Image (cartoon, rainbow, N blue to C red):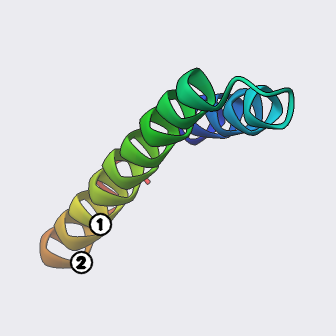
Amino acid sequence: MLKWALIFFVVGVTLAVLGFGGIGGAFVEIAKILFFIAVAIFVILLVLAVLGGRSAGL
């Protein structure tokens, strides 16, 4: 998921530099949403691993 966030961010910044600010901003917003979802999933799995005492998929 972080890979997709990075792809959307790079495409968004590229579009913004080329003058397509509206769609570039939309791509950057999607990248931010994907990043925060990935961080939330990581935190949930980390808490599960600590509470469960095993790896929980990490």
- Please give left or right for residue 2 compared with residue 43 in the image: right
Nearest the viewer among 17 and 3 is 17
Q: Is residue 33 above or below residue 30?
A: below
The residue at 57%/42% (across/down) is 2
The residue at 44%/54% (across/down) is 58
**Mark 2 neighbour class, 10 Å CA radius: few under 14, some 14 to 19, many 20 or more:** few
The residue at 75%/39% (across/down) is 13
Q: Is residue 4 above or below residue 9?
A: above
Secondary structure category for the residue under label 2:
helix
Q: Is residue 35 above or below residue 4?
A: below
Q: Which residue is mark 2?
A: 50
Q: Earlier in the sequence, mark 2 or mark 1?
A: 1
Nearest the viewer among 10 and 25 is 25
The residue at 44%/33% (across/down) is 30
The residue lying furthest to the front in this view is 19
Q: In the rendered structure, which amino acid carries the disc numbered 1?
A: Val
Secondary structure category for the residue under label 1:
helix
Q: Which residue is mark 1?
A: 43
